[in-house]
Image (tube, rainbow, N blue to C red):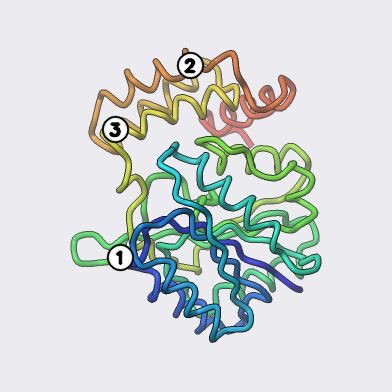
Amino acid sequence: MTFTIIMPIHNEADHLERVLRAYEHQVKKPNQLILVNDGSTDQTQEIIDAWSKTHHWIDAVHLKKDHYHAPGTKVVQAFDHGRQYIKGTPDLIGKFDADIALPPQYFETLLRHFSEQPALGMASGLLYIYKDHQWQYEGLAKTTKIRGPVKLYRTECFDAIGGLRPCIGWDSIDQWLALYFGWKIQTYADLHVKHLKPTGANYQTNGQAQQGIAYASMRYGLVLAFLSLAKLAWFYKRLSILSQGLKYYWQNRSAPLISAQQGAFVRRFLWKAIFGVK
């Protein structure tokens, strides 16, 4: 199977060499790695230009500096810009971040699973962060969730869900839509990915509360939004995430990004999970 990886990058020079070396050491390298420099002000441009000159399978793309920033939105826009540079029609397409270090067998393992399972639409390993002098699972989400920094899609699945939504919570919306359209999604616990910069490290104070927008976009409903934000507030130990998140939810509840039928599917799935119903 052929596969292309698109990596949006903004000011990740501190990690970038290590990240790219992990790609260089993959047992199965991407057919194409598209590095999208999204207006970085550090040494990102110089690093990716150097790598693209010495590795025929790496392409460097540069976007102009833009002071506008919104969690989720900018990264998807950079990813979509990178899609314009895809060569051919790959079987798989990946959206990967510039602050993760992949184990050498990462792509080899996932390609095997995609080859063996025609219904597999989306897959990944699990993210680990360095904490208390050891690598620990980043418990921000359940181990069944395919996290935004390490998403690999079957191209047919990616097309079926209509690509990525440029908003916070895009990495949940795509997963729900994949399930809605009958695709299988899977994480593989044997693939440990090092997340070199924990999720939310660059967020402004209580930036996590903007997940309330995502829950409105996915038609969670008030009760499910409350429970989800409460869990987030507990994880970050900040009660204000709950109050501000509910405010964001209420302000955006009239602007969903999925249909009413898809929203009903999401709510049924979540309630079944809460009550342990299969």
Tell me the CA gap for discs 2 and 1: 34 Å
Q: Secondary structure at mark 1?
A: strand
N-terminal-most mark, 1 or 3: 1
Residue type at mark 3 is: Trp
Q: What residue is at 76 percent from the left and 57 percent from the top?
A: 155
Mark pair 1, 3: CA separation: 21 Å
Query: Which residue is depicted at the point 45% across and 25% down?
Result: 212
Q: Which residue is mark 3?
A: 234
Distance CA(mark 2)–CA(mark 3): 17 Å
Three-letter amino acid code at the position of disc 1: Trp
Q: Residues within 10 Å of mark 2 (few under 14, many from 20)?
A: few
Is 264 left or right of 208, judged from the image as shown? right
- x and y, in percent, of residue 266 in the image: 64, 29
Q: Taking 122 as reference, is 161 above or below it?
A: above
Residue contact at pointers 2 and 3, CB within 8 angstroms:
no
Based on the displayed image, in which of its 4 quarters is residue 217 positioned? top right
Residue under label 1: 135
**Image quarter (top left, top right, bottom left or bottom right) of the C terminus:** top right
Q: Is residue 105 above or below residue 214?
A: below
Q: Residues within 10 Å of mark 1 (few under 14, many from 20)?
A: some
Q: Which mark is residue 223?
A: 2
Above or below, comparing residue 178 to residue 24 in the picture: above
Secondary structure beneath label 3: helix
> At 43% across and 38% down in the image, what residue appears?
68
Q: Are marks 1 and 3 in contact (CB under 8 Å)?
A: no
Marks 2 and 1, the one that precedes in the sequence: 1
Residue 186: x %, y % from top left: 62, 55
